[in-house]
Amino acid sequence: MVAMKKTFVLDTNVLLHDPSAMLRFQDNDVILPITVIEELDRFKKQPEMTGRNARQVSRTLDNLRERSHLIDGITINGGGCLRVALCDRETLRELPPELEGDKGDNAILAVALELKQRCDCPVVVVSKDTNLRIKADALGLAAEDYETDKVDVEELYTGTTEVWVDNETIEHFFKDGSISLDKPIFPNQAVTLIDSTNPSHTALAIAFGRGETATDNPHTQLIPAIKVPHGGISHIQPRNREQKFALDLLLRDSIQLVTLVGKAGTGKTLLAIAAGLHQVANERIYNRLLISRPVIPMGKDIGYLPGDVSEKLTPWMQPLYDNFDLIFGTQEPQGKPAHWRRGHEELIERGLLQIEPLTYIRGRTIPKQFMIVDEAQNLTPHEVKTILTRAGEGTKIVLTGDLDQIDNPYVDAASNGLTYVVERFKEEPLAGHITLSKGERSHLAERATILL
């Protein structure tokens, strides 16, 4: 049975989230209300990805209109039709009194209502704005979130697995430093071996790459023990199982992409910085440690900040500076002496450390660097793709984030770039992932995370 063709009316936030969204609806028709074009014009001057995405949508539409008039409709890939629709004033006046006026959301609803009245096919409003979807439903319109890149958070890949074995197998593992497992395991997946006769007797391993074939059976893999320095690195010692797994992945230069997901205080950023410093300053595997994070405020924005770029970035990058202070033991002393300076400042002067906002990443090629993108849960899949495609030869990228602390209004736990990358790369030999669950910042921080 052939599915009925649908008409999708897109909200502006869908295009800001994914600039190519209007081309992703296969053989269905896509309608852009004229108010969306007007809103894109207002967004195009914004900094970072929002402005760039708005400009990209405008360029795409400008190229398409060379083929035909947008008001008449243009055939797009998959057989569908893309059209810009004007808002009928009469339909706008027919909206309930509470929705009166030419507000952008109301104009989108008016366009969708008019299409529903004269179109035989189903009309669906697509928006990442929860309230707009609720209003559309109240008016009898079908409404959906944009879910092309959504991930089931409840089933999100954790990067770990547990395997129950007998005592003899555990002893053999400790003796030989590896074990053969006849079990489907993802590349670079962390494995906890549990003694079936004594569950407290465990061993930790990681299936690096696709695993070495131990026999003629392609499903049997040789799983080696993890290798974490006993004294830790950069004065940082892993405190739990997940942190040991994470540190092992971070120290393996054969793994080019590491994603770390966990609640506040689990050590994601601290471990990444410690591993990066060790491999840049001590082992000289990489030329520089590059750290970046999206400049998105929590709560009400404080507006423009005074000073040069370095001074403007200080409030945003302060969490990173705090981690360096912990590693170097350089918390600011009282009555700061004239010669005093923070630990990361010397590294910056020597060219071993660079801290900058993601605004400056686009268009660059970044070779032989250990790059950390903190707070990656605030990025869209499109933004993460832009970052990963900057990686040059010999570069390692680490994405860290907490899915419970998303400040970007255009993404959620299921649609942000971090979860998207975790799911897409879980079968790739060059990538590894760990979900950290136990908070190690302090007992208070751990209890607050659980109780509040």
Image (cartoon, rainbow, N blue to C red):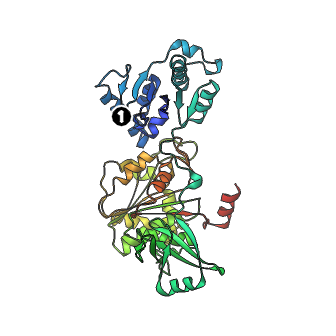
Q: Quadrant of the C terminus?
A: bottom right
Instruction: Determine which residue is flagged by label 1.
Output: 77
Query: Residue 425 in the image: x percent, y percent?
Result: 43, 57
Q: Secondary structure at mark 1?
A: loop
Q: Residues within 10 Å of mark 1 (few under 14, many from 20)?
A: few
- In the visual, does 202 lie left or right of 258? right
Q: Is residue 47 above or below residue 257?
A: above
Query: Residue 360 in the image: x percent, y percent?
Result: 36, 49
Q: Is residue 3 above or below residue 402?
A: above
- In the visual, does 235 lie left or right of 350? right
Q: Which picture quadrant has residue 279?
A: bottom left
- Res 152 visible: yes
Q: Nearer the viewer, residue 1 or 280?
A: 1
Query: Residue 299 in the image: x percent, y percent?
Result: 58, 44
Q: Is residue 199 above or below residue 273?
A: below
Q: Nearer the viewer, residue 112 or 279?
A: 112
- Residue with the most extreme top position: 90
- Res 339 visible: no
Tally of marks: 1
- Residue with the most extreme right position: 451
Residue type (three-letter) at the residue carrying disc 1: Asn
- Residue with the most extreme bottom position: 175
- In the visual, does 73 lie left or right of 405? left
Query: Residue 63 in the image: x percent, y percent?
Result: 30, 30
